[in-house]
Amino acid sequence: MPITKISHRQKSELFTIVALIVVVAAMRLLPHPMNVTPIGALGLFAGALLPSRTAWLLPMGALLLSDMINGFYALPAMALVYAGFWCSAVIGRVWLARRRTPERLIGAVLASATVFFIISNLSAWLMYYPRTLEGFVQCYISAIPFFGRSLLGDALYATLLFGLYEYIRRFQPQWRTA
């Protein structure tokens, strides 16, 4: 639906969602503990609240832009890292688009961090470890501390994003139906 055909309430809500995404995505550029980033939470949030065609673009665009600003370049193996973040938008769409409860949000955060861990460390294994069963096992064992940090980042930023959104939604007069 063209943006001119949506109501003032819908425009206000969309502006708030996009503003929250932009502000939180910019936080990735600030100093932070390794792997404690907002990208997984952005995927969940965008997947839950934006149209499906748009939902995966925002976290991927935020990741690509921040990687370019930070001087990281997408090597071919980075495609798996980006795929892991794309999955967070899919999880947000499937688990949180129709019904958001604290339990569903916790489940989505756990699923998103786990899927990202599995996919992104496949990339690390292919790039940095011997392509043997021993190399595979060593890669995933070495990555366990990073899983905890990713889970922490996803949980913190998802709580921030969904919490602010619900708070604003509750008190935003333009969003109330007549």
Image (cartoon, rainbow, N blue to C red):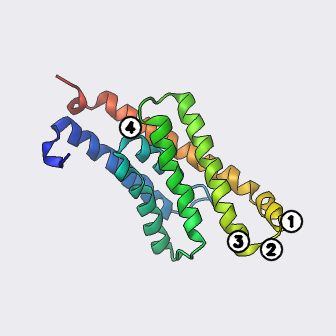
Distance in Å between CA atoms under marks 3 and 2: 8 Å
Q: Amino acid at mark 3?
A: Leu
Distance in Å between CA atoms under marks 3 and 1: 13 Å
Distance in Å between CA atoms under marks 4 and 1: 45 Å
Q: Nearer the viewer, mark 3 or mark 4?
A: 3
User: Which one is in front, 125 or 23?
Assistant: 125
Quarter containing the C terminus: top left
Q: Nearer the viewer, mark 4 or mark 2?
A: 2
Q: Amino acid at mark 2?
A: Pro
- Crowding around mark 4 (Cα neighbors within 10 Å: few <14, some 14 to 19, many 20+) is some
Q: Residue at x 32, y 32 (%)?
A: 169
Circle 4 sits on which residue? 165
Q: Residue at x 53, y 74 (%)?
A: 74
- Crowding around mark 2 (Cα neighbors within 10 Å: few <14, some 14 to 19, many 20+) is few
Circle 2 sits on which residue? 130
- Whole-percent x and y of residue 45? 44, 44
Q: Earlier in the sequence, mark 3 or mark 1?
A: 3
